[in-house]
Image: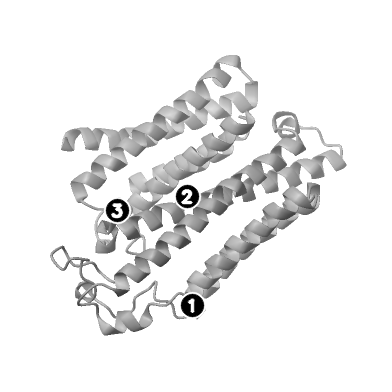
Amino acid sequence: MTALMTVLTILLPILYLAVWADYLWLFYTEHPLARRTCSRAAGVVVVLHMGVMVLRGLALHRLPMGTQAEFMGALAVALLGTYLVVERRLRAKNTGFLTTGAAGLMMLSAAVVEPGGAKVSPLLSDPGFAGHAVLVLLAYTALSLSFLYAVLYLVLARQLMRRRFGLLFRRLPALETLERMSVVAVEMGVPLLFLALALGHLWMYDLADRPGLDPRLAQALTPWDPKILFSWVIFLGYTAGLVGHRFFGWRGRRMNIMAVAAFVTVVLGMGAVHHFFPTFHKFPGLDASAVTAPRGDGPAFAADHQLTGER
């Protein structure tokens, strides 16, 4: 099994690059063979990668997102899988070279990152935290795809306005399709973010009720944590955008500028919250004995709410 996992770990970055090459071939040539094979190849890679993650998780007895390499790999498969859902809904394949290229770059980074030396959070063995982490990853991956399609919409609209009809203009989907792809990505991200927040709250309350909880951590646990509050603001903001698109006719350039601005705000806001405000997500100063298992007979969980040892 170890030998098989090693072979698959080496093979996955090559497969991701092969999928990217297939989509790039489609973009440049519109070849029928590339159109037939690219989505199927990407689907096979997603299934294979998820299988590898399941096997690795069973072997490690935790969610395989604890090291930088593991996190980059999880982000790559989340990006590719989310893209395939959007592509299948709208039958638009010509943007695939961008997302598969990004996923391939992440897999290459995961392959060259030093695997040792990272402090892995034992919280990744907690099913509640693991589920919360996966949902957060999928939600923000979908929102990042919405940002990408909104940028492509604005680039294509600018080329149309300036009458520059190059390869990008000829190959990208129509403006209406790009806008719809952006909206579909948000329609995926918003419920995923809600589920992530709901599960995070449930996990937090379950953690607070565990016997032997460190008093410092118990005092820090609060739904008014700045990172949680800002996450709810993000959820409400994107929900308002969907409502405006559905019921108030928010369309076109204005809608896509709003999508770009929203994602930039998310990135800058999360960075500011993480840097300037105290948050129990960091669990400062607490060690692995601070949190005990629900029944008191399982392994202790470290009080470190970070997906990787470096974040």
> 289 or 64, which lies in front?
289
Q: Secondary structure at mark 3?
A: loop
Which residue is at the far left? 297
Q: Are marks 3 and 2 in contact (CB under 8 Å)?
A: no
Above/below status of 87 relative to 271: above
Graded by Cα atoms within 10 Å as few (under 14), some (14 to 19) or many (20 or more), the crowding at tag 1 reads: few
What residue do we see at 55% from left, 66% from top? 232
Graded by Cα atoms within 10 Å as few (under 14), some (14 to 19) or many (20 or more), the crowding at tag 2 reads: many
Q: Which residue is mark 1?
A: 224
> Residue 222, image x and y in percent?
42, 77
- Is residue 119 in view? no
Q: Earlier in the sequence, mark 3 or mark 2?
A: 3
Q: Which residue is mark 2?
A: 138
Q: How is the image coloured?
A: one colour
> Identity of the amino acid at label 2?
Leu
Quick one: quadrant of the N terminus?
top left
Graded by Cα atoms within 10 Å as few (under 14), some (14 to 19) or many (20 or more), the crowding at tag 3 reads: few
Q: Which mark, by number, is residue 114?
A: 3
What residue do we see at 57% from left, 63% from top? 267
